[in-house]
Image (cartoon, rainbow, N blue to C red):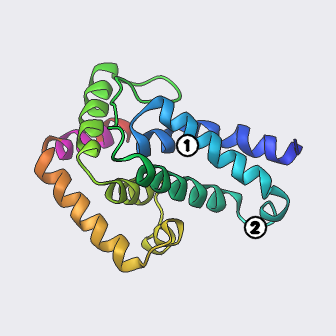
Amino acid sequence: MDEEFEQFVHAGLARWSRVAFLLTGDHHAAEDLLQNALFKLSLQWRRVRVETPDAYLRKIMYHEHVSLWRRSHHLRRERSTDTLPEPGAARDHAADTVRRLLLRQALEKLTRKQRAVIVLRYFEDLSEADAAEALGVSTGTVKSQTSAALAKLREVAPELHVLVGRAREAWA
């Protein structure tokens, strides 16, 4: 394997694992998603490494995620887990656990596209244009999916607003 590719994977593995988990809601599915995406990236590495490998991997992951869902959404339902993978020690384990559980439950109530847009826009902090490019949709679709997802989150988990505010204060 190419040494540059190994370094790229090692440097971003924790981050990409969290993204995959946020998309799938399941540790095993997240591992499979990330493994498949990294394999596809490895096949194109010589061409991609001079461009932007993060953007390319992101696009592979989101397309693979939607593609897998389309093939299997009638066959099986997502299963939730009790923990999210996070690096480092948390300041308040109880509050972090409550926040993660509420967030996970809220994200499970979104459609796949809504969840993908929320992860791209707010976890990865991408612009609307960059999120649209990663998903292969228009900026208008990103805007409408974001609006629908945020409305749904406000409806199903109004307590998240309070918890997110408290987390920001604790981390500031």
Residue 72 visible in the displayed image: yes
Kind of residue at badge 2: Glu
Residue position marked by numbered label 2 in the rendering: 51
Query: What residue would you read off at disc 1?
Result: 33
- Which quadrant: the C terminus? top left
Q: Is residue 85 visible?
A: no
Q: Is residue 72 above or below residue 104?
A: below
Is 92 situated left or right of 21 in this image?
left
Relative vertical location of residue 142 with respect to residue 2 in this rendering, above or below: below
Q: Nearer the viewer, mark 2 or mark 1?
A: 1
How far apart are the alpha carbons under marks 2 and 1? 22 Å
Nearest to the observer: residue 83 or residue 76: 76
Label 1 amino acid? Answer: Leu
Q: Is residue 21 left or right of residue 46?
A: left
Residue 124 is situated, as x and y percent measured from the top left of the image, at 48, 54
Span highlighted in magenta in the image: 160-168
Query: Could you say whether the residue bearing mark 1 is in a helix, strand or loop?
Result: helix
**Residue 35 position in % (x across, y down):** 64, 40
| Labels 2 and 1 touching (C-beta < 8 A) | no
133 above or below 66?
A: below
**What residue is drawn where x is 35% and y is 38%?**
76
Residue at image coords 37%, 71%: 142
- Is 39 placed left or right of 50 in the picture? left
Q: Quadrant of the N terminus?
A: top right
> Dot 2: what SS?
loop
As drawn, the residue found furthest toward the top would be 94
The rendered magenta stretch, by its main secondary structure, is classed as: helix
- The quarter holding residue 83 reads top left
